[in-house]
Image (cartoon, rainbow, N blue to C red):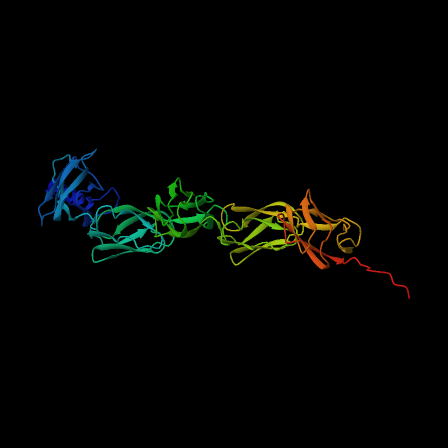
Amino acid sequence: MRKALIRRLLSLSMVMLIAFTAKAQYPNTGNHTVCLNSVEPYGVLFTSGSSYAWNILAGTGGGGVITAGATPNLITVNWTSTGNCTLQVVETNSSGCVGSPVSILVTVVATNTIVLTSAAGTNNQTVCVNSPITNITYTTTGATGATITGLPAGVTGNWAANAIIISGSPISPGTFPYLISLTGGCGTVSVTGTITVNSDNTIVLTSGVGTNNQAVCLNSPITNITYSTTGATGATITGLPAGVAGNWAANTVTISGSPSVQGTFTYTITLTGGCGNVTETGSIHVNSENAITLTSAAGTNSQSVCTNSPIITITYTTTGATGATITGLPAGVTGNWLANVVTISGTPSTSGTFNYTITLTGGCGTITASGVIDVTNSNTITLTSAIGTDNQTACINTVIIPIVYATTGATGANITGLPTGVNGSWAANQVTISGSPTVTGTFNYTVTLTGGCGTTTATGSIDVSPVPSTSAISHN
């Protein structure tokens, strides 16, 4: 009787001292919840036996696989199905006494899950600053919430009804790795992704100020126009004149060439690739070369005139120019440009051959026109015989005092108005009037030079008196 009582007390003592712990966190005992596919350690806190029989008793679906530990009182369980079950141990001591079973209720819960449900790749996307991202969505199971960290400013994430939605428009550029960690439920479950935010493309003029709006002459090279770009992977350039081309390379747009057509050309640069709809405009104004055309009568640009006689006015029409310089004109002749017309006029006061040049100023090209004004001295006639011989009195049939004139410029002379018997001639730049008048009267003569320059005359008079006659001498 006594021995049986002792054995019973020992058996009761062993039952009271047996307990379990999960994850080796002693002295955690009692019913508990574990995650599906987790491997949990269990053991007897107070040991006195020599052997331990571990079992998982069926419940509402929960179950696992027991693996022996380093000592008989320690095991691990890989929980392989969800539901409720009982983990039980029975201890046997060295005397063969078997204790009462000790057990705990274990609830096996499925592990939290998170699955990307927006389009593939949305969890790692690139977007432009201030542009909305493509919404990123995840479906979760098991969790009661989630924390989302690492998002760019302007983008937010939230969990509701087993769904995570990340949306918004980032306001600053950069690379933003984000982390989603599920809370509540079973297991430590997280996912990561990246939102890369690019700055908008930029384009900046880097050639000289004003080169983006320039005027150039037809068939002359423009001043190269350059722009620096960021973000873009290329550019299209439209609206350039024929002969001018634009290209993008190594983040630089270059516009160059010689326009072969005239007009005003507004060009547009549109960046491609990168972020944003970024354009830049400018203009190239292509002017025709200046022109000058004689509009006065043909031959007026090469004329001969006498000194002190007005030239025939010479006129030219110009296009493109804003002025003109006229050089080489004789003294007394001037030239000016006004309202696209060059006018040359005046009276030359010096003789010579004057090659003049008109050079247009302003506008396009170096354009000139030239001509000749040949100025000849006017004919002259000068009395070289004695003073008064050009107006003399002579007797009929008596030789007059010869009248002589020296001439310049002329190639001859006409002498009219002489009395019969008196003749005039021109030779070697000299006019000579001589002879014996055979008639009486007053004769006003005119010497008119021929050839040379100008209408030059000289006049004079020969007064022819009769010879007195006496028929007789009377004596009173």
Q: Quadrant of the N terminus?
A: top left
**221 left or right of 461?**
left
Residue 92 in view here? no
- Could you tell me which residue is drawn at 56 percent across and 54 percent down? 312
Q: In this view of the protein, which residue sits in the foreground, 312 or 467?
A: 467
**202 left or right of 84?**
right
Q: Is residue 77 placed above or below 182 in the rendered structure?
A: above
- Could you tell me which residue is drawn at 78 percent across and 55 percent down? 395
Q: Position of residue 225 (x, y in %)?
A: 45, 45
Q: Position of residue 346 (x, y in %)?
A: 62, 55
Residue at the outermost bottom position: 476
Q: Position of residue 166 (x, y in %)?
A: 28, 54
Q: In this view of the protein, which residue sits in the foreground, 410 or 434?
A: 434
Residue 203 in view here? yes
Residue at the outermost front position: 475
Q: Quadrant of the C terminus?
A: bottom right
Residue at the outermost right position: 476
Q: In this view of the protein, which residue sits in the foreground, 92 or 380?
A: 380
Give the tally of numbered discs: 0
Location of residue 249 by image quarter? top left
Q: Position of residue 244 (x, y in %)?
A: 39, 44
